[in-house]
Amino acid sequence: MDAYGHINNVQVVRMLEEARIAAFGPPRGAGLPGIEPQVALFNDVEEGTLALVVEHRIRYLRTLEYRNVPAVVQVWIGAVKGASFDIHYLVQDPVTREDCVKATTHLAFVDEASGRVLRLTPDQKQRLAPFVH
């Protein structure tokens, strides 16, 4: 929370990460399993493949007040390209259900050894397809 009692912008990015992991799983090797993701996408890649954030775009529509209950975060897939894809988020106040934050994370899979971006496999595109809006 910031000095005004709102959720700090750095914490909003952390909320986006938590929502992304809940929906698509943690990166490979990120500790013990927790809740089952809706789609095991990030932890089900070849050894040596990293899922990296290319860009975040965040629009603050209204302040997200600090509350003692979790915010509501809707997550869906946007554009799926040859070597990258977008995850979209809508963060809502858990009490009023007002829209507070709209955000997009642009992700790519990268070869850890070479640093080269990898093309999405047909299987990865198929896993993403039901969540594209």
Image (cartoon, helix red, strand yellow):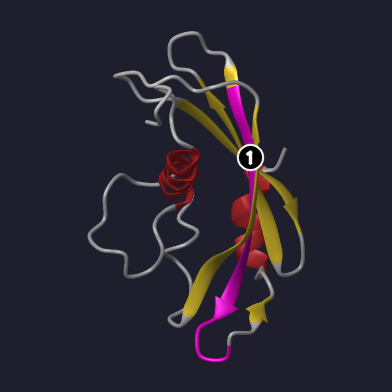
**53 left or right of 80 in image:** left
Per the rendered image, the range of residues in magenta is 100-114
Task: Name the outermost residue toward the left.
Answer: 32
- For the N terminus, the image quarter is top left
Closer-to-camera residue (74/133): 74
Residue at the outermost top position: 96
The quadrant of the image that shows the C terminus is: top right
Relative to 74, say whether 41 is above or below.
Answer: below
Question: Which of the 4 image quadrants contains residue 132?
Answer: top right
Residue shown at 31%/64% (left/top)? 30
Task: Name the residue furthest front.
Answer: 3
Image x and y of residue 110, in percent: 58, 77
> Relative to 22, is 90 above or below?
above
Image location (x, y in percent) of residue 74: 55, 31
What residue is disc 1 on?
Answer: 103
Q: Locate residue 60 relative to residue 42 in the image: left or right.
A: right
**Neighbour tally class for label 1: few under 14, some 14-19, many 20 plus, Cα within 10 Å:** some
The secondary element bearing badge 1 is classed as: strand
- Report the residue at 48% width, 51% height from top: 24
Magenta region includes residue 59: no
Q: Position of residue 69 (x, y in %)?
A: 32, 20
Name the foreground residue: 17 vs 127.
17
Which residue is at the front of the view, 4 or 45? 4
- Residue 89 sits in quarter: top right
Among the 4 quarters of the image, the one containing residue 67: top left
Residue 110 painted magenta: yes
* Whether residue 78 is situated above or below residue 42 in the rendered picture: above
Q: How many numbered discs sit on the rendered protein?
A: 1
